[in-house]
Amino acid sequence: VQLVESGGGLVQTGGSLRLSCQVSGPSLNYYSWAWFRQAPGKEREGVSCSRSGDGNTYYAESVKGRFTISGDNAKNTVYLQMNSLKPEDTAVYYCATDGSTMGCPNDPILNNYWGQGTLVTVSS
């Protein structure tokens, strides 16, 4: 499994970005897919997850109503649409999977596959 993120950049407060995670290997339907982020000096935290086994999606409280996770099976790509961005959203964002259809572990250690990350900077 190879994951390649893109779409990060510099945006002003209140702006939007869409992150992409190109998946090489399994079809999106085989695994659950998550987005994590890590701000400078902070631990990596779960942002959102889409569980392919039952179609459920999960969001951290801090991003609920602003971020949306989705997937395009034809492109084998997972997206994270981020709206109403805030300076506290500044972080490196990572795509990840634990390699199961029903898992969305919030603990980064339990995710087996990671992309290289893409930097999102929100200016105030």
Image (cartoon, helix red, strand yellow):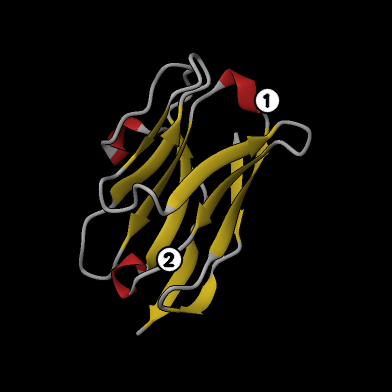
Nearer to us in this view, 2 or 97 = 97
C-alpha gap between disc 2 and disc 1: 31 Å
Looking at the rendered image, the quarter that the N terminus falls into is: top right
Residue holding disc 2? 84
Mark 2 neighbour class, 10 Å CA radius: few under 14, some 14 to 19, many 20 or more: some
Looking at the rendered image, the quarter that the C terminus falls into is: bottom left
Mark on residue 114? none
Residue 81 point in image, percent of width and height: 54, 53
Left or right placement of residue 102 versus residue 19 in this view? left
Q: Is residue 21 above or below residue 41?
A: above
Pick whichever of labels 2 and 1 is earlier in the sequence.
1
The kind of secondary structure element at disc 2 is loop
Three-letter residue code for mark 2: Ser
Q: Is residue 123 above or below residue 68?
A: below
Mark 1 neighbour class, 10 Å CA radius: few under 14, some 14 to 19, many 20 or more: few
Residue 104 point in image, percent of width and height: 37, 28
Nearer to us in this view, 74 or 68 = 68
Nearer to us in this view, 66 or 116 = 66
Residue holding disc 1? 27
Left or right placement of residue 111 versus residue 10 in this view? left
